[in-house]
Image (cartoon, grey):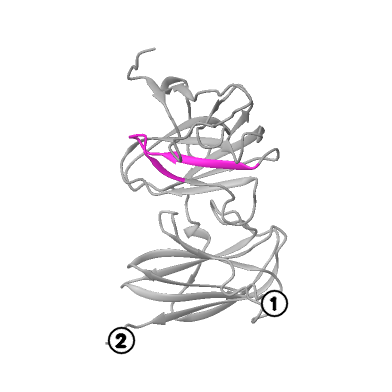
Amino acid sequence: MPRTPTRLLIALTFAMVAMAGAQRPFNVPNYYVSQLTKLQAGVSVTGQLDESDGQNYKDGSYLDIYTFETGMDEEFVVTVSSYDFDTYVSVFDPEGGLYDGNDDDGYGDAYTSRLQVYPYTAGKYYIVVSGYSQYDLGEYEIVVDQGIGAGLEDATPISAPGQYSGVLAASDPTVPSGWTGPSHAFLLQLSEPTALRIAASSNDFDTYLYVYDSAGYAVASNDDADYSEELGYNSDSALFTLLSPGTYVVYVAAWSLDGEGAYTLDLEVYVPQR
């Protein structure tokens, strides 16, 4: 069939090599753009991978393709999760070039994949859901988060330098578009560029730190600052970041959904020296 403007052939160019010695027919991933499901920010969609879907040329894994339209520099986060198989998510830019891919969310959860995208051009992005291998089939859920509010109205004002303490309850709200457990939000306003070391410590739970800007986009995060045998596998969090003038939300969160207890938040300011 000749190409038409409405026809999309995504070849998943991780490695453009057809499977050698395949034991069953290979389903070429040909799709019409008009047939692809359009994702809306904050609205989850349930899908199903089965042997009727197209396969990618990398490893033969089956795939579904979605679209998401966004403006330049309008960051979005794609999350794919499943109880049935090891998910993999890939994002292609409006020109069809591979932006990036993610397997295990970076946190050891093989069934959840998450990819943060910083669009360098406006337009329609293509999101490809697949399994880690051709044997990964089943139901999954996909959601795109974009421009999520950072909880400014509920955040406790803080300043830097400074030290603060609190008690986290399992019933406290989680971080917007984060994947960790309950959290407390702190509002930090900076009038000039500032280099900060932000640390969260607790004897009761495994801490996790997030820094968001006022638009709700993640700036920095950290789980374990030094999870080493020398420090007794300490689960305290710390990050070092240079922030521009503006308003930020610092979240102290628990790694697990049932994490709770007392914690300390510490902010140190670093001044450049010549």
> Mark number for residue 203?
1
Q: In this orientation, which residue lies closer to the viewer: 156 or 225?
A: 225
Q: Residue furthest front?
A: 21
Q: Residue furthest left?
A: 274
Q: Secondary structure at mark 1?
A: loop
Q: Quadrant of the C terminus?
A: bottom left
Q: Indicate whether residue 95 is drawn in magenta.
A: yes
The stretch of residues the image draws in magenta is: 86-100
Q: Disc 2 marks which amino acid?
A: Gln
Q: Which residue is mark 2?
A: 273
Q: Secondary structure at mark 2?
A: loop
Q: Does 38 appear above or below 181?
A: above
Residue 229 x, y percent position in the rendering: 66, 78
Residue 26 x, y percent position in the rendering: 56, 24
> Mark number for residue 6?
none
Residue 129 relative to residue 202: left or right: left
Q: In this orientation, which residue lies closer to the viewer: 133 or 143?
A: 133
The crowd level at tag 2 (other Cα within 10 Å; few <14, some 14-19, many 20+) is few
Residue 225 relative to residue 67: left or right: right
Q: Disc 1 marks which amino acid?
A: Asn
Q: Quadrant of the N terminus?
A: top left
Q: In this orientation, which residue lies closer to the viewer: 73 or 35?
A: 35
Gap between marks 2 and 1, in whole Å?
35 Å
Q: Residue furthest bottom?
A: 274
Q: Indicate whether residue 103 is drawn in magenta.
A: no
Residue at 62%, 29% (x, y): give it.
49
Q: In this orientation, which residue lies closer to the viewer: 213 or 199?
A: 199
Secondary structure mostly taken by the magenta-highlighted segment of the chain: strand
Residue 16 x, y percent position in the rendering: 44, 35
Verify CB contact (< 8 Å) between mark 2 and mark 1: no
Q: Does 94 appear above or below 187?
A: above
Residue at 46%, 22% (x, y): give it.
31
